Image: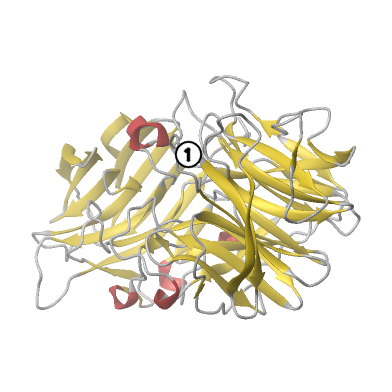
Amino acid sequence: MVTAKNPLIAGFYPDPSICAVNDDFYLVNSSFAYFPGLPIMHSKDLANWEQIGNILDRPSQLPLEEAGVSRGLFAPTIRYYDGLFYCICTNVSFGGNFVVTAENPEGPWSEPHYIEGADGIDPSLFFDDDGKCYYCGTHENIDGCRYDGDYFIYIQEFDYKEFKLVGKRVEAWNGAMRGVHWPEGPHLYHIGDYYYIIHAEGGTGPEHAISVARSKDVFGPYENNFKNPIFTHRHLGKIYPIQYVGHGDLVQTVNGDWYMVMLAVRPTKGYTTMGRETFLARVIFEDDWPIVNPGLGVLSDELKIKLDECIPDCPNTSVPNVSKSYNFTKMEKLGPEFMTLRAPLGDALRLTGEGLELKCGTDSLSELAHPSYLCIRQDSKNFELKAKLYTDNLMMGTRAGICLFQSNEFHVRFEVSENKGRVVMVKDGKAEILAQDTLDVSPATLVMTVNGLKLSLYSLEEKGMKPFIRDLDISALSTEVAGGFVGCTVGIFATDGEDRPEPVYAKFVSLDYKRNEPKLAQ
């Protein structure tokens, strides 16, 4: 037996999809306008995971120019059939629905095969026992939307070798509730005598829920489960520590047990800054209907899994839910957990043996552009971030430092220029300098601490910690205020107010992220 702890993958890892290949499990998540796209995790026991790469790691696979932070890649689905991995997804900013394939989940993955005629979002693939493949997606009501979120789930046969839809299209299901909003994230399964559609409805917020329908024919008609929704937290009130539960995907272990991954959030006083995270629940079937977390009916902090524990043999930085420490002077390449906005940094980032050099680019964090920003996901309500950088070469107009970033319109920067530090908060697109003071040493160590909705910033001086700001309210960096579908990221940045003939590089020596969350699900 092994014990899995929730959240299974903490932080900004929404819209999980999972598949099993023998005794290996693979999980992918949405990544929106971050590059590379679609992080992929591997596990042997459903409890211990490692990030083995990113499915879309080349610019040709992932056009995101000027995409909003909550645009780009929505709701992937990963499946395996006949020796090949398939990942289907929507790029809502460029191209629409597409499929990529790989022989190995670590990659390389193919160029996108965009699917003609596949409108809507949240596509899924299902390979049936007879070798046929079906596309299951969502789109607007073909009779016209009567209200926002008046969508239908449709099914059509898919030629997975030519990557095109064939045959008839069936409007299969539009959710369990009367007047349902946003039936989405559908997955199709064939279990026993029935085909099942498991999907989310109610929108990916407080009314989120998981419902199911079944049929003995892949095209239906699909019958409603009168116990729908089969899983939700929307009835538990705003004080419950885990909310927004939905968007489930089933997986079966080699011993025949069923589990479901899904997304949920852990608000702090009603505000969600880490975004939607990945959780796990047990599933059984009664009367040929799935029951999620039987006898409990809500997500648990822990669950026992009848598999042998298997802790991955990999760098600690590639493991989710742990603190991370980077000495850039000893690194030759970055791990798969690092992200940038919209495109790779290319020669704007250099690992030289003396540290990580980040070009002071002319694009800023406040623009829908390509700033010099290197980040990881915030995955704990309480953490400390430290970055050591040289300040001597940061001339007038150039700035470098650390950032807690929700979007171009909502973030907090601790930036250094000319041996001076200042705190800038961007709220609703408006920047305000909240504090500024001198920095006495180079390299300087910038420190950010976050405890729930309070952020403090310091510089580490010879005499100790020098405060720049204490207990800054960061509730504006939440989904509830800033909107969108992402959680916060933390990282380092460098900008320049001028387009210089010779670029200036900020040199970072190290980056440390220490999480402090004694009980994950609280």
The front one of 127 and 410 is 127
The front one of 133 and 468 is 133
- Residue 310 left/right relative to 103: right
Q: Is residue 60 above or below residue 411?
A: below
Q: Position of residue 10 (x, y in %)?
A: 58, 45
Q: Is residue 430 above or below residue 359?
A: above
- Residue 291 left/right relative to 386: right
Crowd tier of the residue under label 1, counting other residues whose Cα lies within 10 Å: few below 14, some 14–19, many 20 or above:
some
Residue for badge 1 = 149
- Residue, x 63% and y 77% (percent of image)? 102
The front one of 11 and 459 is 11
- Residue 434 left/right relative to 116: left
Kindly tell me whether residue 391 is visible in this rendering.
no
The front one of 237 and 7 is 237
- Residue, x 76% and y 55% (percent of image)? 189
Please, what secondary structure does the residue beneath circle 1 have?
loop
Number of marks present in the image shown:
1
- Residue, x 39% and y 43% (percent of image)? 484
Q: Position of residue 163 (x, y in %)?
A: 59, 75
Kindly tell me whether residue 169 is visible in this rendering.
yes
Report which quarter residue 350 is drawn in. Answer: bottom left
Residue type at mark 1: give it: Gly
Q: Position of residue 518 (x, y in %)?
A: 61, 35
Q: Position of residue 490 (x, y in %)?
A: 39, 50
Report which quarter residue 511 is drawn in. Answer: bottom left
- Residue, x 27% and y 36% (percent of image)? 467
- Residue 189 left/right relative to 337: right
Which image quadrant: the C terminus? top right
